[in-house]
Amino acid sequence: MASRGNRVLVPQAKEGLSRFKMESASEVGVTLNQGYNGDLTSREAGSVGGQMVKKMVEAYEKNL
């Protein structure tokens, strides 16, 4: 089975997702590079992803 990776299903959204990720990283005090970020710890990467999910859930609840 081929790996799908982290591909963006809507190419036009790629820039917005990148900006959202950088904003979320800044909020939790993690410095991201524009390219390679493989040197992040699991804790740092998880805190960025967690912040993104938290913001998406808040936006969803606000729009209910």
Image (cartoon, rainbow, N blue to C red):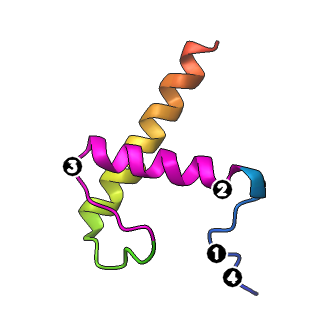
Q: Amino acid at mark 3?
A: Gly
Task: Reply above or below: 43 against 50.
Answer: below
Residue holding disc 1: 5
Residue holding disc 3: 29
Residue 56 placement, left or right of 22:
right
Tag of residue 14: 2
**Label 1 – label 4 distance at C-alpha:** 6 Å
**Label 3 – label 2 distance at C-alpha:** 23 Å
- Pointer 1 local density, CA inside 10 Å: few below 14, some 14–19, many at least 20: few
Give the number of the mark in front: 2 or 1: 2
Residue 49 placement, left or right of 39:
right
Q: Amino acid at mark 1?
A: Gly
Quadrant of image for the C terminus: top right
Q: Amino acid at mark 2?
A: Lys
Location of residue 58 in the rendering, given as x and y in whole percent from the top left corner: 48, 24
Residue at 47 percent of width and 41 percent of height: 53
